Amino acid sequence: MTDHQLLLFLAEVLVLVVGARLGGEIAIRVGIAQVVGELAVGICLGPSLFGKLWPGGFAALFPTDPVQRGGLEIMSWLGVMLLVLLSGFETRLGILRHVGKVVVIGWIGGFFLPFAMGFGLGWLVPENLIGRSVDRPVFALFIATAMSISAIPVIARILLDLDLFKTRIGMIIISTAVADDTVGWIVLAVVSSLALSHHVNAGEIALTLVETATFLVLAFTVGQWLVRKALRSSELLKVPYAQTTVILVIVLLGGAITQAIHVHLVLGCFVAGILIHRSPGRNSNRDSLSAIWRVGMAFFIPFFFGYTGIKVDLSTLRGAALPVALAAIAVACVGKLLGAGLGARLGGLSTWEAIAVGVGRNVRGAMELVIAAIGLSIGVLTVPMYTIIVLIAVVTTLMAAPLLRYCMVKRSAEPAPSPPTSREVVAR
């Protein structure tokens, strides 16, 4: 990297981080999710606005030089790894052992219906919107995964803001979202591996499934033991911030292992977060993660959202892409609302409680942006489809809080239900 390239790289990072942070601040002040503001600034800095108003300035600040873009991509992936690590740390797999039928049925409906609808949409998308390096089945599986996942951090923040986090509805939403993300990241890793092979056949699918299953088994047995030993040993070291360093090493190692076996690094980072949470000394682990969280939230994660935004090109949503965008947003919302809502209703919730569960599960937020970034990087998504996936994240996140608030008002007007049995409530 030359002196000029380094100077330009620093300018790009400065603009993206400061812009994203300002966008997040404005979003919080007007009462919407921070991620939406950070992403919106990135979109404005990209070809959708800045590139249209001042093409020369955009080309000068964000050139297509591979070296320049390579540096930004690395920074972006560091943000992804930290985001997924923290998501994994907040994933409580133990909660799934004590759930009632409302959570089980609600999760099945809320995951598999949008997955099936997304797969169907993937088969109908015009050929020119599919990445050239992948077969349609892989593309359809990728779209299905994007439709079925939820965003635990954003959901939790919305529930906290509405004083719903510790309610029965809140715990049901969180429990089903945990299952969504856990299964979703595994499926995404498998689909990404198939995409990188550029074709689908029975042998490739079997090999990918075996590699993924082997990694998960070893991670939650040998890996869990090694993580516990490493974290305990770090507490005995005199070097400042030793445990923070060990945690970063664990997440980098997890990502490297899954990347090495051609299963995407997000699965390794997600599992690393879960293993750290399941290790003794959670308070000290949380303190160390808090330091990582502060740096991540102040710098790397806003950079990721801003950089995600500048790759969005709204001008590509013309011709066949526009109806596909509308159909994709409809499929994403209807699949989650109908699947999760009907599942929760069959599980014993009242009508408006079930709708509230569907609304909560419909939030895609930051996790959808990670999926979009992965899809574009491995060639599954074209720029128009990438833009569509990002729009799904924005629309579903924006609609969640007002719709949840409305559902709670309607729920209060419903006749009081009979007290739930111990099997129907989520253990706290």
Image (cartoon, rainbow, N blue to C red):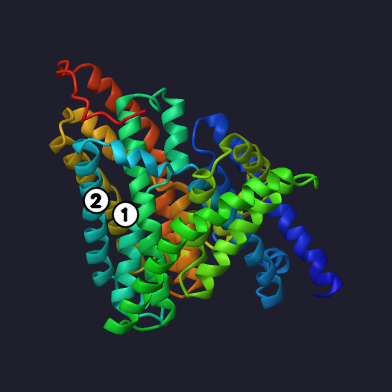
**Number of marks present in the image shown:** 2
Label 2 secondary element: helix
Residue at x 60%, y 53% (from the top left corner): 306
Q: Quadrant of the N terminus?
A: bottom right
- Nearer to me, 28 or 60: 28
Residue at 18% of width from left, 30% of height from top? Answer: 349
> Residue 335 location in percent, x, y?
24, 50
Of the pair 49 and 34, the residue shown nearer to us: 34
User: Would you name the residue on which mark 1 appears?
Assistant: 148
Say which amino acid is labelled 1.
Ser
Q: Residue at x 36, y 78 (%)?
A: 207
Q: Can you say whether 145 is above or below 244 in the image?
A: below
* 1 and 2 marks in contact (CB < 8 Å): yes
Q: Earlier in the sequence, mark 1 or mark 2?
A: 1
* Image position of 209 (left or right of 256): left
> Measured from the top left, where is residue 270 in percent x and y?
49, 55
- Work out whether residue 42 can be spotted: no
Residue drawn 22% across the image and 26% down it: 422
The x and y percentages for residue 93 are 39, 44
- Mark 1 is surrounded, within 10 Å at the Cα level, by few (under 14), some (14 to 19) or many (20 or more) other residues, namely many
Numbered disc in front, either 1 or 2:
1
Q: Which residue is mark 2?
A: 335
Is label 1 in a helix, a strand or a loop?
helix
Whether 132 is drawn above or below 312: the answer is: below
Q: Quadrant of residue 160?
A: top left
Identify the image quadrant of residue 49.
Answer: bottom right
